Image (cartoon, rainbow, N blue to C red):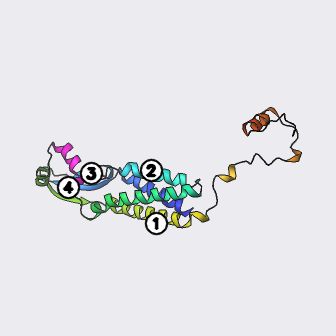
Amino acid sequence: MYAVVGFLIAGGIGTISATQTWIMARRVDAAEPLLVTGADAVPLLAALSLAVLALGAALSIAGRALRYVLAVLGLGAAAALIAGTLPISLDPPLSSVAPVLTKATGLSGGKALQALVTALEPTAWPVAALIAWTLLLAASAFVLLTAHRWKAGGRRYEQNPAVRHADAGPLDPVDSWDELSHGTDPTGPSR
């Protein structure tokens, strides 16, 4: 249960942070900084954050084997997101704001953009996202270590067709169709 909550929290923070300002790019040609969102700074941020939310939802009902697969996918997503977020939270590279700068100014190329930018200042959002990815990494590792001890999620909703109550009485037409679906002839000698 804790792992599912960890996945959902990490995915939620990532999804929200994708729309928030991650970097303020100060330029020589403008008084106001250019605001760069998380989705612009890390192109995979929104997609992977939504995938993490889906992994968390799937993890809550998955069987044992699928839990391991989901945990490995969670580890991969955490590694990719940490690799994309860590440089921005420490010292944003020019490449993380280049597409937004090119769209705003019409200039492209490393030298032209470098001459245009005076400072790249990260906000608190990359740090918040980095904490979320660390939580995702821990939740994924937790699933790998404990998945064998979880109760089976989907089995409580399955019905065993071999189990039949003696006092159930005669079959109605719906039950007859169900028997046929399970490979039993409801008109056979056993009835």
Amino acid type, residue under disc 1 in the picture = Ala
Q: Mark 3 or 2 closer to N-term?
A: 3
Q: Which residues are magenta?
A: 94-108
- Mark 4, Cα crowd under 10 Å, few <14 / some 14-19 / many 20+, is some
Relative image position of residue 16 (x, y in whole percent): 40, 52
Left or right? Give the position of 158 relative to 110. right
Of the two numbered discs 3 and 2 in the rendering, the one whose residue sits closer to the viewer: 2
CA gap, disc 3 and disc 4: 12 Å
The mark lying in front, picked from 4 and 2, is 2
Quadrant of residue 146 in the image? bottom right
Task: Left or right? Give the position of 188 relative to 71.
Answer: right
Report the disc number at residue 94.
Answer: 4
What residue is shown with label 3? 36
Q: Where in the figure is residue 132, as x and y percent of width and height?
A: 41, 61
Residue at which label 2 appears: 51
Check residue 87 for magenta coloring: no
Residue 1 position by quadrant: bottom right
Q: Which residue: 23% across, 52% down?
A: 97
Q: Indicate whether residue 105 is drawn in magenta.
A: yes
